[in-house]
Image (tube, grey):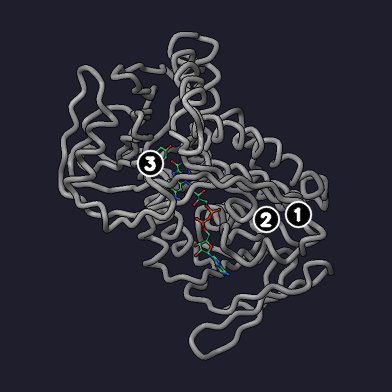
Amino acid sequence: MADRTQVAIIGAGPAGLLLGQLLHRAGVETVIVERRSRAYCEARIRAGVLEQATRELLIEAGVGERMRREGLVHGGIRLHFDAESHRIPIDQLTGGRTVTIYGQTEVVKDLIAARLESGAPVVFDASDVRVEGIGGDAPVVRYRTGDSAAELHAEFVAGCDGFHGVCRTLAGADAQDSWQREYPFAWLGILADVPPSTDELIYARHARGFALHSMRSETVSRLYLQVAPDEDPDAWADDRIWDELAVRLHADGFTLQPGPIREKSVTPMRSFVAAPMRHGRLLLAGDAAHIVPPTGAKGLNLAVADVAVLADALDAHYATGSDTGLDEYSDRCLRRVWRAQHFSWWMTSMLHVDPRDDAYGAELARSQLRYVCTSPAAATTLAENYVGLPHEFAVRR
Ligand code: RFL
Ligand code: PHB
């Protein structure tokens, strides 16, 4: 394994892997260091909605072929509340833009396959990953694989190691501002071997809480229920999950088809931003720098938007010696990050039942939903944020 590289990438999630792919195509050397196994990274079930610009970038980066074949292109979403179903025609409201339903798990598999095929180095199962010297010109990444210790000298370190990684903490509390909000609820998510009962995603608000009907393919459904943050997934037998989903998703003309549940887990909900996203030779991207609650389907798309800007900035540094892109990296990304923070918080508060809230708060949320379903202006606000505001996706190769 190389002991020297231009850019050391910490983390093989979507952010780290896509950055590696874009830089490889730009002729910039990278080594990816990941603490989990390849199998673990390829099995993690998470996001499912790709913005149009995310889809376009994956295609441009040469990893979009299977997504093009298997991804489901959606031009709208449905909102269910008060036993009524309303459609938001996202494509009509945004000049023909769409989202693609394709699991993050599949994106990660495609990126790992491309990485291995390219021959560019990736280290899985790295333990004790430590990064030193980000304030100087010669950062070092130290880690262990099995019994042996390794040292990787780099010119830059990309911190793509997610919310629980090590990179964000390197700058020290004094050099970083952070903002956060914890929500008094979580999502119980299931993956079920049953054809989706709907051809478009359904986001539902019910007095008993939020529910979401999503999907992975024509034969696999992905659904979520709002639950308490400390909910034990084992307290939810399959029948109880399907019964609760049927109650919350109910609307005239809709029938939920239950089926065998393959996977079940509880995800906490939080909003978090750390700024700046650059500290000397360390560049943070994706969940390492910011988290959104999943209601707006923005987390993966933000990670992709960050690395598009970062790949361009690093490419310019090596190709032309210009550091303008690196100097502007944090500010450029944070503008998009805060827009997505607001949208995700807004969708979350409109669609969930906050147990701390009073009846007045619940009526405000229902009024907002009715407004979105009746006013083209309000619907367009939802649609243009959901499908993704224009990216600055000028990726040079
Ligand atoms: P990841 O995916 O967490 O990857 C970080 C990687 O770093 C590794 N790592 C380390 N490696 C080396 N040394 C260390 N010390 C390390 N510490 C950690 C980890 O093992 C991992 O491989 O972050 P990245 O790449 O920034 O990607 C972000 C996305 O994963 C995340 O934002 C989305 O999954 C959020 N999200 C959604 N986003 C969307 O855009 N659309 C959606 O529909 C959507 N739905 C969701 C979601 C997240 C969910 N959960 C489970 C939180 C639905 C759910 C339920
Ligand atoms: C998913 O399919 O996992 C999914 C879809 C939409 C969201 C969040 C998650 O807002």
Between residue 28 and residue 302, name the one nearer to us. Answer: 302
> Horizontal and vertical percent for residue 201?
34, 30
> Horizontal and vertical percent for residue 340?
59, 35
When the figure is inspected, residue 249 is found, relative to residue 220, above or below; the finding is: above
Q: Would you call the spot at circle 1 few (<14 residues within 10 Å), some (14-19), or many (20 or more)?
A: many
- Farthest residue to the front: give it: 358
Question: Which label was assigned to residue 127?
Answer: none
Residue annotated with mark 2: 284
Is there any visible trace of residue 351 in the rendered image?
Answer: yes
Label 3 to label 2: alpha-carbon separation: 31 Å
Which mark sits nearer the N-terminus, 2 or 1? 1
> Horizontal and vertical percent for residue 334?
70, 41
Is there any visible trace of residue 307 in the rendered image?
Answer: no
Q: Are marks 3 and 2 in contact (CB under 8 Å)?
A: no
- The quadrant of the picture occupied by the N terminus is bottom right
Residue annotated with mark 3: 226
Q: Would you call the spot at circle 3 few (<14 residues within 10 Å), some (14-19), or many (20 or more)?
A: many
